[in-house]
Amino acid sequence: MNNDSVFLTIPNKPDYISMVRLTTSSLANKLGFDFDTIEDIKVSIGEACINSLQFCHKGSISIVYESYIDKLTIKVSNCKDNIPKEIEEKKDRELGILIIKSLMDKVDFTDEGIEMTKYIK
């Protein structure tokens, strides 16, 4: 499963986040991550999707998984690190970003969304 890409598009609805977490868990397991690391990745993808729900205006959220020999990279569209003051639950969203940054090895925000990386040890 090295050097593979998996594309997932879900409706901009919280009901689909559990499906994303299950997909993420399956991919991480196939790459050989241990149980605790898989849980960290699942929490991170869930937080990224929750964040994306606030900023998605297209009706769908795009998720791209890229597997490599030494890492898993996950990109989530519309996930933002700069939470506007008028957003409800601003502190919860900021906490979600902190959780992602603490659980993943590398986190980058772009104009398109977030890119999270977990290295295979």
Image (cartoon, grey):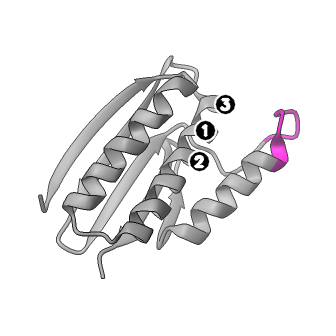
- Looking at the rendered structure, which numbered label has been put on residue 59? none
Please identify, in this view, whether the residue under mark 3 or under mark 2 is nearer the observer: 2
Q: Which mark is residue 54?
A: 3
Q: Position of residue 49 (x, y in %)?
A: 54, 39
Of 111 and 49, nearer the camera is 49
Q: Are marks 3 and 1 in contact (CB under 8 Å)?
A: yes
Farthest right residue in view: 85
**Res 29 → quadrant:** bottom left
Question: Distance from label 3 to label 1 (Cα)?
Answer: 7 Å
Q: Which residue is mark 1?
A: 50
Residue drawn 63% across and 45% down?
80
Q: Residue at x 45, y 43 (%)?
A: 76
Q: Which residue is mark 2?
A: 47
Q: Of the residues shown, which amino acid type is indicated by label 1?
A: Ile
Q: Is residue 25 above or below residue 9?
A: below
Of helix, strand and loop, which one carries label 2? helix
- The residue carrying pointer 1 sits among few (fewer than 14), some (14 to 19) or many (20 or more) residues within 10 Å by Cα, namely some
Q: Amino acid at mark 3?
A: Gln
- Quick check: is 16 in the magenta stretch? no
Percent x, y of residue 119? 34, 74
The amino acid pointed to by label 2 is Glu
Q: Which residue of the protein is positioned furthest toward the bottom in this rendering?
A: 121
Marks 2 & 1, CB-CB < 8 Å contact: yes
For the record, the magenta segment spans: 84-91
